[in-house]
Amino acid sequence: MIEGSLSRRYTRALFQLAREAGEEEKIGQEVEQFYAAYSQTELQRVLTNPAFSLDTRKKILAQVLQSQRLSALTRHFLSLLVDRDRLPYLIGIVNAYRRLLNEAKGRIEAKVVSASALEGDRLAQLRDRLRAISGKDVVLQQETDTALLGGLLIELEGKIYDGSIRTQLEKMKQRIARGY
Protein backbone atom coordinates (compact mmCIF):
# COMPACT_ATOMS: atom_id res chain seq x y z
CA MET A 1 0.00 0.00 0.00
CA ILE A 2 2.68 2.51 1.02
CA GLU A 3 4.92 1.42 -1.85
CA GLY A 4 2.11 2.03 -4.35
CA SER A 5 1.25 5.46 -3.02
CA LEU A 6 4.92 6.49 -2.97
CA SER A 7 5.40 5.28 -6.52
CA ARG A 8 2.30 7.16 -7.69
CA ARG A 9 3.35 10.36 -5.91
CA TYR A 10 6.83 10.35 -7.45
CA THR A 11 5.37 9.40 -10.83
CA ARG A 12 2.83 12.22 -10.84
CA ALA A 13 5.54 14.74 -9.96
CA LEU A 14 7.86 13.49 -12.70
CA PHE A 15 5.05 13.37 -15.24
CA GLN A 16 3.93 16.91 -14.43
CA LEU A 17 7.47 18.24 -14.84
CA ALA A 18 7.91 16.30 -18.09
CA ARG A 19 4.58 17.61 -19.38
CA GLU A 20 5.55 21.21 -18.57
CA ALA A 21 8.74 20.67 -20.58
CA GLY A 22 6.77 19.00 -23.39
CA GLU A 23 8.88 15.85 -23.08
CA GLU A 24 6.51 13.24 -21.65
CA GLU A 25 7.46 10.56 -24.18
CA LYS A 26 11.19 11.24 -23.97
CA ILE A 27 11.31 11.19 -20.17
CA GLY A 28 9.28 7.98 -20.07
CA GLN A 29 11.69 6.32 -22.51
CA GLU A 30 14.69 7.51 -20.51
CA VAL A 31 13.34 6.18 -17.21
CA GLU A 32 12.59 2.84 -18.87
CA GLN A 33 16.06 2.84 -20.45
CA PHE A 34 17.65 3.35 -17.03
CA TYR A 35 15.42 0.71 -15.47
CA ALA A 36 16.46 -1.82 -18.13
CA ALA A 37 20.12 -1.24 -17.25
CA TYR A 38 19.37 -1.19 -13.53
CA SER A 39 17.05 -4.13 -12.96
CA GLN A 40 18.44 -7.53 -12.05
CA THR A 41 22.05 -6.35 -12.31
CA GLU A 42 24.95 -5.60 -10.05
CA LEU A 43 24.05 -1.92 -10.43
CA GLN A 44 20.80 -2.51 -8.55
CA ARG A 45 22.59 -4.28 -5.72
CA VAL A 46 25.15 -1.47 -5.40
CA LEU A 47 22.75 1.49 -5.64
CA THR A 48 20.37 0.05 -3.03
CA ASN A 49 23.02 -1.30 -0.65
CA PRO A 50 23.37 0.83 2.50
CA ALA A 51 26.86 -0.62 3.03
CA PHE A 52 28.02 1.81 0.33
CA SER A 53 28.01 5.44 1.37
CA LEU A 54 25.49 7.78 -0.21
CA ASP A 55 28.35 9.68 -1.88
CA THR A 56 29.68 6.49 -3.45
CA ARG A 57 26.23 5.49 -4.70
CA LYS A 58 25.65 8.98 -6.14
CA LYS A 59 29.01 8.91 -7.96
CA ILE A 60 28.23 5.52 -9.48
CA LEU A 61 24.78 6.74 -10.50
CA ALA A 62 26.27 9.87 -12.07
CA GLN A 63 28.64 7.76 -14.19
CA VAL A 64 25.83 5.51 -15.36
CA LEU A 65 23.55 8.46 -16.16
CA GLN A 66 26.31 10.20 -18.09
CA SER A 67 27.00 7.07 -20.13
CA GLN A 68 23.30 6.80 -21.00
CA ARG A 69 23.09 10.48 -22.03
CA LEU A 70 19.86 11.14 -20.17
CA SER A 71 18.18 14.54 -19.94
CA ALA A 72 18.71 16.80 -16.94
CA LEU A 73 15.19 16.13 -15.65
CA THR A 74 15.71 12.36 -15.67
CA ARG A 75 19.14 12.67 -14.07
CA HIS A 76 17.81 14.89 -11.28
CA PHE A 77 14.84 12.59 -10.71
CA LEU A 78 16.97 9.45 -10.43
CA SER A 79 19.43 11.27 -8.16
CA LEU A 80 16.51 12.24 -5.93
CA LEU A 81 15.44 8.61 -5.73
CA VAL A 82 18.95 7.62 -4.61
CA ASP A 83 19.09 10.51 -2.09
CA ARG A 84 15.79 9.46 -0.52
CA ASP A 85 16.44 5.72 -0.77
CA ARG A 86 13.48 5.26 -3.12
CA LEU A 87 15.20 3.41 -5.96
CA PRO A 88 13.55 0.10 -4.96
CA TYR A 89 10.24 1.70 -6.04
CA LEU A 90 11.49 2.31 -9.58
CA ILE A 91 9.52 -0.54 -11.18
CA GLY A 92 6.29 0.89 -9.75
CA ILE A 93 7.27 4.33 -11.03
CA VAL A 94 8.04 2.99 -14.52
CA ASN A 95 4.68 1.17 -14.72
CA ALA A 96 2.69 4.10 -13.32
CA TYR A 97 4.43 6.54 -15.69
CA ARG A 98 3.56 4.34 -18.67
CA ARG A 99 -0.10 4.28 -17.57
CA LEU A 100 -0.18 8.07 -17.10
CA LEU A 101 1.44 8.64 -20.47
CA ASN A 102 -0.94 6.29 -22.26
CA GLU A 103 -3.91 7.93 -20.57
CA ALA A 104 -2.72 11.41 -21.52
CA LYS A 105 -2.13 10.35 -25.15
CA GLY A 106 -5.46 8.50 -25.43
CA ARG A 107 -3.80 5.10 -25.73
CA ILE A 108 -4.31 1.76 -24.05
CA GLU A 109 -2.06 -1.24 -23.74
CA ALA A 110 -3.09 -4.65 -24.97
CA LYS A 111 -1.29 -7.95 -24.86
CA VAL A 112 -1.72 -10.61 -27.52
CA VAL A 113 -0.43 -14.14 -27.01
CA SER A 114 -0.24 -16.47 -29.99
CA ALA A 115 1.29 -19.86 -30.74
CA SER A 116 3.74 -18.25 -33.18
CA ALA A 117 4.81 -14.68 -33.85
CA LEU A 118 2.30 -12.61 -35.80
CA GLU A 119 3.53 -10.93 -38.97
CA GLY A 120 3.24 -7.20 -39.68
CA ASP A 121 -0.04 -7.25 -41.63
CA ARG A 122 -1.86 -9.49 -39.18
CA LEU A 123 -0.57 -7.43 -36.27
CA ALA A 124 -1.78 -4.22 -37.94
CA GLN A 125 -5.22 -5.77 -38.57
CA LEU A 126 -5.45 -6.87 -34.95
CA ARG A 127 -4.43 -3.40 -33.74
CA ASP A 128 -7.10 -1.82 -35.97
CA ARG A 129 -9.81 -4.14 -34.63
CA LEU A 130 -8.80 -3.49 -31.03
CA ARG A 131 -8.84 0.24 -31.77
CA ALA A 132 -12.40 -0.14 -33.09
CA ILE A 133 -13.44 -2.02 -29.93
CA SER A 134 -11.81 0.37 -27.45
CA GLY A 135 -12.05 3.66 -29.33
CA LYS A 136 -8.41 4.39 -28.44
CA ASP A 137 -5.02 3.89 -30.01
CA VAL A 138 -3.62 0.51 -28.99
CA VAL A 139 -0.06 -0.17 -27.90
CA LEU A 140 0.26 -3.87 -28.64
CA GLN A 141 2.61 -6.13 -26.73
CA GLN A 142 3.14 -9.50 -28.40
CA GLU A 143 4.11 -12.80 -26.76
CA THR A 144 4.27 -16.35 -28.02
CA ASP A 145 3.18 -19.52 -26.23
CA THR A 146 3.33 -22.75 -28.20
CA ALA A 147 1.00 -24.40 -25.66
CA LEU A 148 -1.90 -22.42 -27.17
CA LEU A 149 -1.65 -24.65 -30.29
CA GLY A 150 -3.29 -21.89 -32.35
CA GLY A 151 -5.63 -18.94 -32.09
CA LEU A 152 -5.11 -15.88 -29.91
CA LEU A 153 -5.34 -14.81 -26.30
CA ILE A 154 -5.89 -11.06 -25.96
CA GLU A 155 -5.86 -8.94 -22.82
CA LEU A 156 -7.46 -5.52 -23.31
CA GLU A 157 -8.56 -3.09 -20.61
CA GLY A 158 -8.58 -5.78 -17.94
CA LYS A 159 -10.62 -8.22 -20.02
CA ILE A 160 -9.28 -11.43 -21.48
CA TYR A 161 -10.50 -12.65 -24.85
CA ASP A 162 -9.49 -16.28 -25.24
CA GLY A 163 -9.80 -17.66 -28.75
CA SER A 164 -7.05 -20.23 -28.40
CA ILE A 165 -7.40 -23.76 -29.66
CA ARG A 166 -6.17 -25.03 -26.29
CA THR A 167 -9.17 -23.44 -24.53
CA GLN A 168 -11.61 -24.65 -27.19
CA LEU A 169 -10.30 -28.21 -26.80
CA GLU A 170 -10.59 -27.95 -23.02
CA LYS A 171 -14.21 -26.79 -23.32
CA MET A 172 -15.00 -29.68 -25.69
CA LYS A 173 -13.41 -32.10 -23.23
CA GLN A 174 -15.59 -30.74 -20.39
CA ARG A 175 -18.76 -31.00 -22.53
CA ILE A 176 -17.98 -34.58 -23.47
CA ALA A 177 -17.30 -35.44 -19.82
CA ARG A 178 -20.71 -33.98 -18.86
CA GLY A 179 -22.37 -35.99 -21.64
CA TYR A 180 -23.40 -33.09 -23.91
Image (cartoon, grey):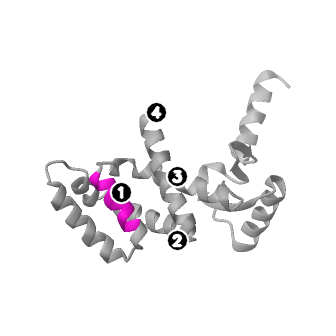
- Which residue type does callout 2 highlight? Lys
- Which residue type does callout 1 highlight? Ser
Residue 133: numbered disc: none
Is label 3 or label 1 in front? 3
Element on which disc 4 rests: loop
Question: Callout 2: few (<14), some (14-19), or many (20+) C-alpha neighbours within 10 Å?
Answer: some
Is label 1 or label 4 in front? 4
Q: Which residue is mark 3?
A: 12
Residue at left offset 29%, top offset 59%: 41
From the viewer's perspective, is 54 left or right of 144?
Answer: left
Mark 1 or mark 4: whose residue is earlier in sequence? 4
Mark 3 or mark 1: whose residue is earlier in sequence? 3
Mark 4 or mark 3: whose residue is earlier in sequence? 4
Q: Which residue is mark 1?
A: 39
Instruction: Give the percent coordinates (x, y) of residue 21.
Output: 54, 70
The answer to whether the residues at label 3 and label 2 have Cβ atoms under 8 Å apart is: no
- Which residue type does callout 3 highlight? Arg
